[in-house]
Amino acid sequence: MPKREKLKQVKQIVCVASGKGGVGKSTTAVNLAVALQRQGHSVGLLDADIYGPSIPLMMGVPPGTRPQIRDERLMVPIMAHAVQCNSIGFLVDPKTAMVWRAPMIISAFNQILSDTAWMALDFLIVDMPPGTGDIQLSLAQSVQLSGAVVVTTPQNVALLDARKGIEMFHKVDVPLLGVVENMATHVCSQCGHEEAIFGTGGGDQLSQDYDTEVIGRLPLDRRIREKTDAGSPVVASEPHSEAAKAYLDLAKKVSEAVVGQARVAAPVITVSDD
């Protein structure tokens, strides 16, 4: 394994990943970043999805906004909801299809990763592309990650792909902070009936199989989708709602898990009179 470097000014790097698309990974990453900021941390958000960047829309950054350039090459992150953000989406036209082969994708990602002038950060949340491809491997090999959060829905098809994501992180020695079960339950806005539309128990089984925890169960809530589409994540726009509370609880558990991983990784020093 190549030596992993630390990003200057960044204390902890946490990637939010999934084995497949459509499970709400980016929505989770965005609200997690805002939730950590609300809890007093300085937070950055890096969009690692070169083919389909969604952070500019979800964070409400106006189209055409470009990062300022410092020292001829460093990109100054764009502030949105008090979170420092960067994305390939700030550098290309939203209608442009990134018809690039893997080497170009890796080069673009590495440039954004290393050439962003992050101000001092407690957490950098990396919104990974779906799958277990080149960008995941490049990130794991190039920088020292504090851990990964794997997002899934309870249904079996999503769980199959989530397992692949977990296995990948194990192979590249990235700690698994926990599993997030998204769209776990839906509460009818008319009658209050709660229903597990995508099934139950999937996250628990996954966490048991890999000796980890379900650190978040997020609701299937229309407001989450509406607020994210409007560029105003629910944690920022409705901080006292039940949906926001679920993300705030997730943020607390992520920060605790990162601290726990740091304690495990720290060397034990013993002193003897011999």
Image (cartoon, rainbow, N blue to C red):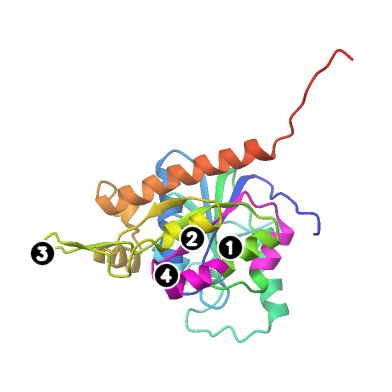
Q: Residue at x 59, y 46 (%)?
A: 119
Residue 124 placement (x, y as % from top left): 56, 51
Amino acid identity at mark 2: Leu
Q: Earlier in the sequence, mark 2 or mark 4?
A: 4
Q: Are marks 1 and 2 in contact (CB under 8 Å)?
A: yes
Residue found farthest to the left: 191
Q: Where is residue 170 drawn, in percent x and y?
A: 66, 59
- Which callout, 3 or 2, points at the residue further toward the start of the chain? 3
Q: Amino acid at mark 1?
A: Ile
Residue 233 seen in the current view: yes
- Local packing at callout 3 (Cα closer than 10 Å; few below 14, some 14-19, many 20+) is few
Q: Height in image: 226 above or below 100?
A: above
The residue sitting at 71% across, 72% down in the picture is: 107
Tell whether position 179 is magenta.
Answer: no
> Of the residues tagged 4 and 1, which is closer to the observer?
1
Instruction: Tell me the amino acid under the disc marked 3.
Output: Gln
Q: What is the spatial separation of the Cα atoms under label 3 and label 1, in whole angstroms? A: 38 Å
Q: Which residue is mark 4?
A: 23
Magenta-tinted stretch: 136-163
Residue carrying label 2: 206
Residue for badge 1:
166
Of circles 3 and 1, the one toward us is 1
Q: In terms of image quadrants, where is residue 51?
A: bottom right
Label 4 near label 2: C-beta < 8 Å?
Answer: no
Badge 1 element: helix
In the picture, measured across the screen, residue 119 lies left or right of residue 205, that is: right
Is disc 1 surrounded by few (<14), some (14 to 19) or many (20+) residues within 10 Å? many
Q: Secondary structure at mark 3?
A: loop
Q: Nearer the viewer, residue 155 or 28?
A: 155
For residue 154: magenta?
A: yes
